[in-house]
Image: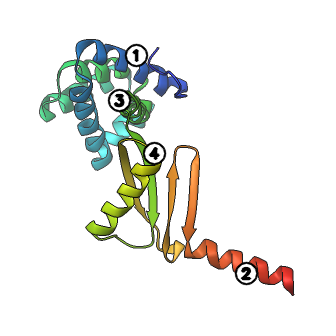
């Protein structure tokens, strides 16, 4: 099965794994991923489409018709479109966004790309971003997909999550450590 060492559970994982196997066999991993991400962006950008996807009030037939129209209008076809229509017909459309994320994770793993999440207090310059990426790449030992999040609450520094490892070099963490150390002394 496509999962290998990665644990992808639940409905989303099973569907994503099956699609991954089909796309790999067809040699269209990237094309399917691109189409799925376009569909996911459409769902994220349209409250009406999001309601159609997540609401149990719509019948499978209504969801299939609605999704088919969206896919045709967006120019999404082939394996990705067939997959999304199948998901709608099986009343699993509520999990399609999780399926897209799980599929992308499987493709990244297949390509040897490691996902890293970096949290910063403010938007970094391109130079700083390149330096962070190079440092994380050196630790990961391969290609990385960097997800940058901005959280002003960390005050400064950064937090890096790479797989199950996390390094918190934020100013907030350091201040809390000092505060804790001072309570121990006094």
Q: Is residue 17 above or below residue 136?
A: above
Q: Is residue 19 above or below residue 167?
A: above
Badge 3 crowding class, 10 Å Cα cut-off, few under 14, some 14 to 19, many 20 or more, is many
Instruction: Check residue 179 in the rendering and tell me which mark sits there, or answer none.
Output: 2
In the image, taking residue 171 as reference, residue 152 lies left or right, namely left
Labels 3 and 2: the sequence-earlier one: 3
Percent coordinates x, y for residue 38 in the rendering:
23, 38
* Front position among marks 1 and 3: 3
Instruction: Check residue 107 in the rendering and tell me which mark sits there, or answer none.
Output: 3
Disc 4 target residue: 140
Badge 1 crowding class, 10 Å Cα cut-off, few under 14, some 14 to 19, many 20 or more, is some
* Front position among marks 1 and 2: 2
What is the residue that sits farthest to the bottom in this orientation? 186
Labels 4 and 2: the sequence-earlier one: 4
For label 2, the SS is: helix
Instruction: Check residue 18 in the rendering and tell me which mark sits there, or answer none.
Output: 1
Question: Quick one: 165 or 32, which is closer to the camera?
Answer: 165
**Mark 3 touches mark 2? (CB < 8 Å):** no
């Amino acid at each position: 099965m496509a999962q290998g060492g990665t644990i992808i559970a639940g409905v989303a994982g099973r569907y994503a794994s099956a699609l991954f196997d089909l796309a790999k066999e067809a040699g269209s991993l990237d094309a399917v991923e691109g189409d799925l991400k376009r569909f996911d962006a459409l769902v994220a950008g349209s409250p009406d489409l999001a309601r159609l996807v997540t609401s149990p009030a719509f019948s499978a037939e209504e969801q299939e018709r609605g999704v088919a129209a969206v896919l045709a209008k967006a120019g999404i076809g082939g394996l990705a479109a067939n997959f999304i229509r199948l998901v709608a017909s099986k009343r699993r459309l509520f999990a399609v966004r999780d399926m897209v994320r799980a599929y992308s994770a499987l493709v990244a793993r297949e390509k040897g790309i490691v996902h890293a999440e970096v949290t910063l207090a403010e938007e970094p310059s391109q130079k700083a971003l390149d330096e962070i990426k190079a440092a994380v790449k050196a630790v990961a030992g391969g290609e990385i997909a960097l997800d940058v999040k901005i959280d002003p609450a960390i005050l400064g520094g950064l937090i890096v999550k790479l797989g199950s490892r996390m390094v918190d070099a934020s100013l907030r963490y350091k201040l809390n450590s000092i505060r804790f150390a001072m309570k121990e002394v006094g």
